[in-house]
Image (tube, helix red, strand yellow):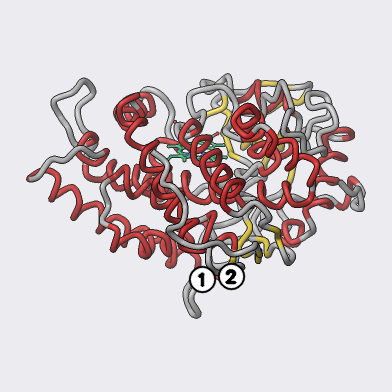
Amino acid sequence: MEQVLSLEEIDLSDPDFWARPLAEREGAFATLRAERPIPFFAEREIPGMPIEPGPGYWSLTRYEHILAASKNPQVYSSARGATAIPDLPVEFNEFFGGMINMDDPRHARQRRIVSRGFTPRAVARIEESVQRRASEIIERVIEKGECDFVSEIAAPLPLEIICDMMGIPESQAPMVFEQTNVILGLSDPEFIAAGETPEVAALRAGGELDALMREMAEDRRRNPRDDLTTALLDASQEDGALTQQELSSFFVLLVVAGNETTRNSISHGMKALCDHPEQRRIWAQDFDGMAATAVEEIVRWASPVIHMRRTCTQDTELGGQAFREGDKVVLWYASGNRDEEVFPHPYRFDVRRTPNEHVGFGGPGPHFCLGANLARREIRVMFREIFEYLPDLRVTGEPERLQSGFINGIKRMPCAFTPGRAGARPRRP
Ligand code: HEM
C-alpha cells in the first residue's frame, strides 16, 4: 500500500486512476477511509457511450457503511443499475444484468427460479465436473513447462463449468469466452475492434450470446435434458419458467458474473502465493485443512469485483452524510476488504485468516453472490491440482492488468514449472 496521492488528487472517475499500480490505488482508498470516507465524485463522459455524464456519486469506502447499504435494499435500490455507475437505458441494464439490476419482488422471483441450478443435486453434479475439468486443464499444460497462467489455467475452468451447467456444446465455448471478454473488458481498448464503439461491441457480443440461448431453448423445449437450461424452462414448478428474454439475460449474467471473477481470483491467488512463499508452504503442509480459510483469503485479497452501485429510493443518511432520493451510492467492496477497522493487517496475505467476513461476494442482502459456493469449490480444486501436479509453478513476469474500475483483472501472466508427463497420474475419483 502506497499513499502517493493526496486527498485532493484522488478521483475515482479518472480512467488514469485505474491505470495506477495496485499499491497506489490501495493507498488512495486508505486515505479516503481515514480522511473522507464518503466522498462525492463527478461523473465523466464515457468515450463511445452516447449518454450525458450523470450527476455524480457518493462513494462508500468503509466496511461498516457498505454493510449498512447492502442490508437495506429498500433504500439502496439496484433497479436503476448495480453494475454501472452511469444510468444506462433500462433495457440495456436488464439484458446485461438481469436480476442483479432488479429489486424484489421481481428479483426474488427470478432468484428462486435460478436457484434450481444450485440445489444439492445440481451442485453435486457440478462438483464432479469441476474436478474433471480442472484435471483436463492441468493435463493440457503439464508437458509444456511454461504457459500463460490466465488463458491456459485460470480462465478455462469457470467458463467450462458454466457451459457444463447450462448444457452448452463444447464447440461453442470459445465463442462464449470471446464475447464475455468483450462485455467485461469494455473499458479496456484491447477488447474493442477497430472502428467499433464500446456500446456497439457490447450489443453485438450480447446478441451472439442471446442467439445461442434461443437455439438452446428451442432444443430443450423439444428435448429436455438434465441441465440448468431445461430446469429454467420448466413451467411446471412454483414461480413458473423464465421467459426467453429472462433466460438469455440470466445466461449473460452467469457468464459475466461467474467467469472473470473466478478466473481473477485464481490468477491473483497464484500471484499472492508466489509473492508470499511462507503462506504457500503453510497451505501445502495441510492443503485440505487450510483450504477453507485460504480460499476465503484469496477472494478477499483479489476482490475481483471492485464496486457495485445502488440508488437511494428516499432521502436518507449514512455515517453522518445526507443522501437525497435519486442519489447514486457506490459500494467499494475492494476498499471494504482492506478496512483496517475490520481486518487486522489488511495488506498481509494470510491463508489462515479467521475471521474473514470479507465483502468480495457482496455484503449480506438479497444480491449476495449466487455462485459463491461454486466459486469457492472451483478455486479450491484448481489450487489442489496445482499444488499436486505443478508444485513449483512460479510467475515469471509482471501480470498485465485490465484497466478497469469495476473488475480487478489480470489479462496475462507468464508462468513456468518443471514439466511432467500427461496421462501419467492417477485419475481422481
Ligand atoms: C470469486 C468469484 C466471484 C466473485 C468475487 C463474485 C462476486 C459477486 C458480487 C460482489 C456480487 C454482488 C452484486 C451486488 O452487490 O449487487 C455477485 C452477484 C452474483 N454472482 Fe457472483 N461472484 C463470483 C462468482 C460467481 C459464480 C461462479 C457465479 C455463477 C456461476 C456467480 C453468479 C452471480 C449471480 C447470478 C449474482 C447476482 C445475484 C443477485 O442479484 O441476486 N458469481 N457476485
Question: Which residue is farthest bottom?
Answer: 194
Number of on-image labels: 2
| Badge 1 amino acid | Ile
Is 31 on the left-hand or right-hand side of 404?
right
The image quadrant that residue 207 belongs to is bottom left
Is 290 on the left-hand or right-hand side of 30?
left
Nearest the camera: 71 or 148? 148
Label 1 neighbour load within 10 Å: few <14, some 14-19, many 20+: many
User: Vertically, is 226 above or below 146?
Assistant: above
Q: Quadrant of the C terminus?
A: top left
Q: Is residue 267 visible?
A: yes
Q: Is residue 49 visible?
A: no
The residue that disc 1 covers is 192
Q: Residue at x 50, y 38 (%)?
A: 375
Label 2 neighbour load within 10 Å: few <14, some 14-19, many 20+: some
Nearest the camera: 57 or 208? 208
Tell me the tag on residue 305: none
The residue that disc 2 covers is 189
Is 38 on the left-hand or right-hand side of 78?
right
User: Vertically, is 360 above or below 289?
Assistant: below
Nearest the camera: 159 or 284? 284
x and y percentages locating residue 282 in the rendered image? 74, 36
x and y percentages locating residue 47 in the rendered image? 59, 66
x and y percentages locating residue 240 in the rendered image? 19, 27
The image quadrant that residue 397 belongs to is bottom right
- Alpha carbon of mark 1 to alpha carbon of mark 2: how far? 5 Å
Beta carbon at label 1 within 8 Å of ligand 1: no
- Contact check, label 1 and label 2, Cβ < 8 Å: yes
> Disc 2 on helix, strand or loop?
helix
> Disc 1 on helix, strand or loop?
loop
Q: Residue at x 78, y 59 (%)?
A: 20
| Badge 2 amino acid | Pro
